[in-house]
Image (cartoon, rainbow, N blue to C red):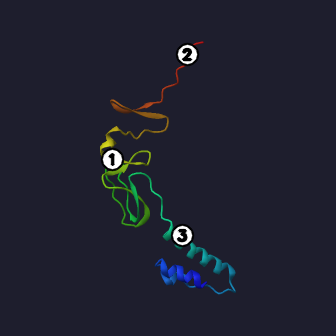
Amino acid sequence: MFEILVVCFMLSIPVSTVEIASPADPAALLSQIMTILKQIMEKLIPLTCGTNAHYTTCGGCDQVCNQEPMMCATVCQKKCVCNDGFVRSSTGQCISQDDCANQCNCPAGKICVPSPKQCITTPCPQYDCI
């Protein structure tokens, strides 16, 4: 148990979360150890973010292509956020704000065509006659 306390100290995990249950209650002891290990893993292995995004411990709401900026509660969440100048596309990728003009938010079964930008029903495949 001493090793867990040392690791928690090194990773700046609050000591209050390291109070260990009595060995007479194995279920509570295991639960507390799992909580401590989860905190250690979160410190050691942050989220892996995609292209044009970065990890933050206090991210808000993402701006999405072709949508008005939304009101966002000031609740900190550990998450990947788009870098400055990038926004979420309809597929969840971080793309340049300039590329939003080429994006559509089409429902299932429809595709986006760029000129004029609109959603159309996916055309049926054409087959050659035999």
Where is mark 1, residue-wise? 96
Which amino acid type is shown beneath numbered disc 3? Answer: Met
Which amino acid type is shown beneath numbered disc 2? Answer: Asp
- Residue 63 in the figure: left or right of residue 122: left
In the image shown, does 16 or 45 lie closer to the viewer? 45
In the image shown, does 15 or 105 lie closer to the viewer? 15
Q: How far apart are marks 3 and 1 (CA)?
A: 32 Å
- Classify mark 2: helix, strand or loop: loop
Q: In this view, does 53 lie above or below 30?
A: above
Identify the image quadrant of residue 57.
bottom left
Q: In this view, does 18 lie above or below 41?
A: below
Label 2 CA crowd tier, 10 Å (few <14, some 14–19, many 20+): few
Where is mark 3, residue-wise? 41
Label 3 CA crowd tier, 10 Å (few <14, some 14–19, many 20+): few
Image marks 3 and 1: residues in contact by CB distance under 8 Å: no
| Residue drawn 48% across the image and 79% down it | 10
- Residue 20 in the figure: left or right of residue 49: right
- Mark yes or no: residue 22 visible: yes
- Which mark sits nearer the N-terminus, 3 or 1? 3
Numbered tag placed on residue 108 in the rendering = none
Q: How far apart are marks 1 and 2 (CA)?
A: 40 Å
The label nearer to you, 2 versus 3, is: 3
| Residue drawn 39% across the image and 55% down it | 53
Identify the image quadrant of residue 60.
bottom left
Point out residue 19 in the picture as x, y percentages from the top left corner: 56, 85
Point out residue 91 in the picture as x, y percentages from the top left corner: 44, 45
Numbered tag placed on residue 128 in the rendering = 2
Label 1 CA crowd tier, 10 Å (few <14, some 14–19, many 20+): some
- Which mark sits nearer the N-terminus, 1 or 2? 1
Which amino acid type is shown beneath numbered disc 1? Answer: Ser
Point out residue 59 in the picture as x, y percentages from the top left corner: 39, 63
